[in-house]
Image: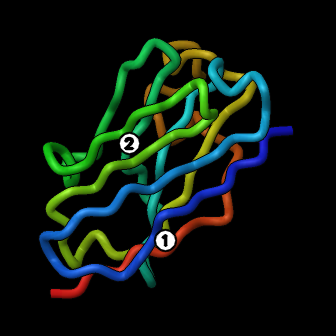
Amino acid sequence: QVQLVESGGDSVQSGESLRLSCVASAYTYGAYFMGWFRQAPGKEREGVASYDTDGTTIYADSVKGRFTISKDTAKNTLYLQMNSLKPEDTGTYYCAANPHLKRFADCYSDTWTDCLNRWGQGTQVTVSS
């Protein structure tokens, strides 16, 4: 079973940067469709970015041009580089995976946020103005 452990959350000022990391325990890490979600207080969880096994990425409109998702297969680690942070980026960030899904194209849904079903415990990001 996949275990996902996030780290890198912190409290920062508006305009600063953070890099989140997610270490996956399963050796078949490289074959998973993965992504990052976030949840702000009082709001529903929303998809931030996804990373397909061929390197294709998808971003929420709110983070395009500021966030970059990437993966280091050798380290079994998924990253989320967050630049030009804004107070509205505040929330708990969750790493997600689907160990039974190699490609987003094979998912039953055409919405990538429907295609992930394993979650980490989350890491807190707080951005102050």
Residue identified by numbered label 2: 49
The residue positioned 17% from the left and 50% from the top of the image is 66
Residue 102 locus on image (x, y percent): 62, 16
Residue 127 locus on image (x, y percent): 27, 80
Mark drawn on residue 81 = none
Along the viewing direction, whichever of 121 and 71 lies nearer the viewer: 71
Q: What residue type is labelled 1?
A: Thr
Label 2 Cα neighbours within 10 Å, binned few <14 / some 14-19 / many ≥20: many
Q: Which amino acid does label 2 sit on?
A: Ala
Tell me: 103 left or right of 64: right
State the separation of the CA atoms marked 1 and 2: 14 Å
Label 1 Cα neighbours within 10 Å, binned few <14 / some 14-19 / many ≥20: some
The residue positioned 60% from the left and 25% from the top of the image is 74
Quadrant containing the N terminus is top right
Residue 78 locus on image (x, y percent): 52, 40
Mark closer to the chain start, 1 or 2? 2
View extreme (front): residue? 74
Mark drawn on residue 92 = 1
Tell me: 100 left or right of 83: right
Identify the coloring: rainbow
Quadrant containing the C terminus is bottom left
